[in-house]
Structures are given as C-alpha cells and as structure tokens.
Image (cartoon, grey):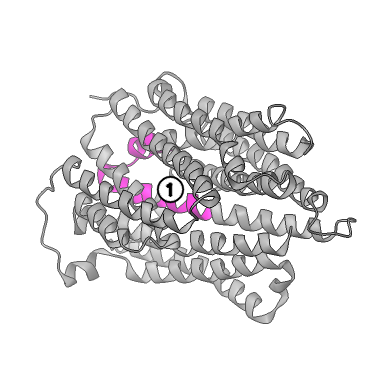
C-alpha cells in the first residue's frame, strides 16, 4: 500500500475510535436527564454549523441509539415495529448511497468542500423534521447539576474515553507504520489502554453492586443473545467498512478508475441493502433469528472471497458486481434483528443504553477492522517482490490479503451466530 493511501486511512481509524463513550453516555442519561426529542434536536443544531467529520460519526450513532429507544417506546410490538426498525436501517443505507454518488460527483466537478455545505443544509432540514415528527416530551424531573452528577457514570466515561482514546492513537500510528509499535511511547500507551480494560470492568461492576449508574453494566453481557450480536456486529461492521475502503482503493489504485466511477460501482450493493432491510422487517417474525443471521453471514462471506480471487483485468460484471451485491447482506440483516433482540430481551428503560452499546461496538469494530487490514496490506505490499511498491501489482498483493482476511472473519462471525443465537428463536413477534 502506498504511503499516501495509509496516511489517508489514519484519520478514519482515529475518528471512529475516539468518540464512542459519548454515544454510551447519551444512551445512559437520555431516558433520565432529558427527552429524546431534546437530545436529537440539540445534537443536530449544535453540529449543523460545523460538521466536523469525527464528531459527525458520533452524532449519527447517538441519534440512532436514541431513535431505537423512541421506536421501542412508541411503536407497538409486532410487524409494525419490525418494519419501523428495518426502515431505520434502510434509511442509513439510502443516505450512504446518495452521499457516495454525490461525493464522487463533487470531487469530479466543483470539489469536495461543497459537500460540507450540503451536509449543513441537510442537518437543518433534519432539525425541522425532528421538531415536527417526533413525539412530545413527557414530564420529567427538572435537570440540575445534582442530577447530572448523580445519574451519569462520569468516572466510567472518563476511563472508557481514556482507554479508547489511547487505543485510537496507537491504531492510527500503527496504520501508518507497523514498526512504530516498537517505539517506547506507543508501547507504553498500548499497555495503559490494556490495563484500563479490567479497571473499567471492575468499576462498572462496583457501581452496579452499589445500585449506582454504570456506563456499561456488566449484567448486559449475561444475556447470550445480546453478547452474540455485539460480537457479530464487531466483526461484521469491521469487514463491511473495510471492504468499502479497500474495494474503493482497488477500483482507483489498481484499476485506475475515477472517484465517480468507483462510487457508481457500489450502487448495486446499496440497492440490495435497502431492499434487504425492508424485507427483513416484513419477514423476520416468520423465521428463527439464528437462521436469518447465519444465512446472511454465509452469503456475505462470498463478497471478500470473490475479491480475493478477482483478476483486475476481469469485467466488472464477472466478479466485482456480485461482490458488491453481497457485501452489505450480513450487516443489514444483523442491524434489524439486533434492534429487535434488544427491545425483546431488555426492559424499556434499558433500550437506549443497550442500543448505545450496540452502536459503540459497531463503531469500534469499524476502526479496528480498518486498522488491522491496513497494517496487513501495507506489510504485504512492503514485502512484495515487485520493486515498485506503489504499482498496481504490488498494491493488489496487499489488498488481496485483506480480502482473504475478510472472508475468514465472516466465517468466524457465522460461528459466533451458530453458538450465541442457537436459543434466540423468532424475534419481533406480537405480544399482548
């Protein structure tokens, strides 16, 4: 992998790792400190002026987590709620599709900066829709500094933020050069991050035993279905987002296509993802959840497999097209089913927190997957026998290994689903 390509991935890794504790804090405090409507409106208006890329990722995750809680409380269980959750996932796919194509058009014409102005306008429209569509606030105890201190696990948030922040920095540095992990500073920071993990587990366990707020209560992980879907989304989101980045690099660096041409090649998969989200919502109550998840995971594994076997000279329709069709299958099915599992197995007051944890795991999986695959690709390219390390042939050697790694990861995801969801049964059933 060329140095330029690696450097471009560093902010991607860092931005997606350092923010997640804010998502959990919002899920933890949202039901108690302020209304869902106020949180979403405030979040939209605060960031619509300066749509910072790193905070934008966090903002979206916070909104999705809170919308999960709103849907669980306002939509009756059964087919209506299933379809609601499926459209929440389908909306993300549709938005990504529009943004992907529009981004390619802007880069080829007026430049990327215009995209930020467009995002600002879209956020203002979303703010207006939130004021009009979302349900009215229910009466709550007035917010005070005392309640902020009492109802939020600030120590847990600081520990988690420190751990993920340090890990974010090390991942970004290692993405640029794997040998940098041997430097004393980076090794020390990685060690501190590792030590903070058991410290965090101990702290939230203590908070839970004392009946105090815990950022991520350890009791969440005692539910096998929730633990399984979090592990699956950790791997699946990492593979899906890594596929998006490295397939895009394949189109532009190996096949030497323009940004617009590369973007258009993702559209078939995004159309499939939108339709699949809707179909999952309509049919999920008819089939056991473990069957749907495992079948979708196996199908998704075909995407990196095809890219691992591809010849860059082949026509797009021979292998790359089918890879694009399959790559979002697992993540899209898993999003709807996971949302329904969360509202089925947790009480209503815990929905926002569980949804926030789920979205945080997805963000972390994205950054971890991209970082690992970037390191692997760069090392393979560096060890390539090709004297020109930035040539398409040398780059393809690195990319091909990441696709094989993605294939193996999806098989592991399927194994987790077989074990962890074996007793899940059907989800999204109507209950009186």
Image position, residue 280 (x, y; %): 43, 26
Of the 4 image quadrants, the one containing the C terminus is top left
Q: Position of residue 255 (x, y in %)?
A: 73, 43
Reply above or below: 97 against 138: above
- Whole-percent x and y of residue 343? 33, 38
Q: Nearer the viewer, residue 195 or 236?
A: 236
Element marked by disc 1: helix
Task: Tell me which residue sits at (43%, 59%) in the image.
Answer: 20
Residue 12, above or below 280: below
Instruction: Tell me if I can see residue 78 in this picture.
Output: no
Q: Main secondary structure of the magenta part?
A: helix
Furthest residue to the front?
109
Q: Is residue 374 above or below residue 288?
A: below
Horizontally, residue 425 falls left or right of residue 192, namely left
Can residue 257 be found in the magenta stretch? no
**In this image, 391 relative to 319: left or right?**
right
Residue placed under numbered mark 1 in the picture:
358
The magenta-colored residue range is: 338-365
Question: Quick check: 258 left or right of 431?
Answer: right
Q: Residue at x 18, y 72 (%)?
A: 145
Q: Nearer the viewer, residue 41 or 408?
A: 41
Q: Quadrant of residue 181?
A: bottom right
Residue 96 seen in the figure = yes
Name the spot of residue 117 as percent of width and height, x first. 37, 56
Crowding at mark 1 (Cα within 10 Å: few <14, some 14-19, many 20+): many
Task: Pick whichever, 153 or 118, lies toward us.
Answer: 118
51 relative to 300, above or below: below
């Amino acid at each position: 992998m060329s140095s330029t390509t690696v450097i471009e991935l560093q902010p991607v890794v860092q931005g997606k790792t350092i923010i997640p504790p804010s998502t959990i804090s919002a899920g933890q405090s949202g039901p108690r400190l302020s209304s869902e409507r106020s949180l979403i409106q405030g979040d939209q208006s605060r960031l619509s002026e300066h749509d910072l890329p790193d905070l934008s990722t966090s903002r979206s995750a916070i909104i999705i987590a809170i919308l999960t809680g709103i849907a669980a409380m306002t939509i009756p269980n059964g087919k209506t709620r299933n379809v609601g959750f499926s459209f929440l996932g389908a909306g993300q796919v549709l938005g990504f599709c529009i943004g992907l194509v529009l981004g390619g058009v802007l880069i080829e014409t007026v430049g990327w900066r215009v995209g930020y102005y467009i995002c600002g306008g879209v956020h203002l429209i979303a703010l207006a829709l939130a004021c009009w569509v979302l349900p009215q606030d229910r009466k709550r105890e007035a917010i005070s500094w005392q309640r902020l201190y009492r109802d939020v696990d600030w120590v847990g948030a600081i520990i988690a933020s420190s751990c993920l922040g340090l890990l974010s920095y090390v991942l970004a540095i290692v993405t640029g050069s794997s040998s940098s992990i041997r430097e004393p500073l980076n090794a020390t920071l990685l060690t501190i991050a590792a030590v903070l993990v058991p410290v965090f587990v101990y702290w939230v366990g203590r908070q839970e035993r004392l009946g105090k707020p815990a950022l991520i209560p350890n009791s969440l992980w005692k539910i096998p279905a929730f633990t399984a879907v979090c592990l699956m989304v950790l791997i699946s989101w990492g593979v899906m987002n890594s596929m998006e980045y490295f397939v895009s690099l394949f189109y532009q660096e190996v096949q030497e296509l323009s940004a617009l041409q590369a973007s258009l090649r993702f559209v078939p998969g995004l159309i499939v993802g939108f339709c699949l989200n809707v179909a999952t919502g309509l049919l999920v109550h008819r089939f056991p959840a473990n069957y749907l998840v495992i079948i979708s995971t196996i199908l998704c594994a075909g995407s990196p497999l095809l890219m691992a076997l591809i010849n860059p000279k082949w026509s797009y329709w021979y292998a790359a097209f089918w890879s694009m069709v399959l790559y979002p299958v697992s993540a899209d099915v898993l999003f709807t089913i996971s949302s329904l599992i969360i509202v089925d197995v947790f009480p209503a007051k815990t929905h926002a927190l569980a949804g926030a944890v789920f979205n945080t795991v997805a963000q972390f999986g994205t950054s971890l997957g991209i970082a690992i695959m970037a390191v692997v690709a760069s090392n393979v390219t560096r060890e390539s026998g090709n004297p020109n390390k930035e040539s398409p042939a040398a780059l393809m050697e690195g990319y091909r290994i990441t696709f094989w790694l993605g294939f193996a990861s999806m098989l592991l995801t399927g194994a987790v689903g077989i074990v962890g969801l074996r007793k899940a049964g059907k989800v999204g059933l109507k209950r009186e």
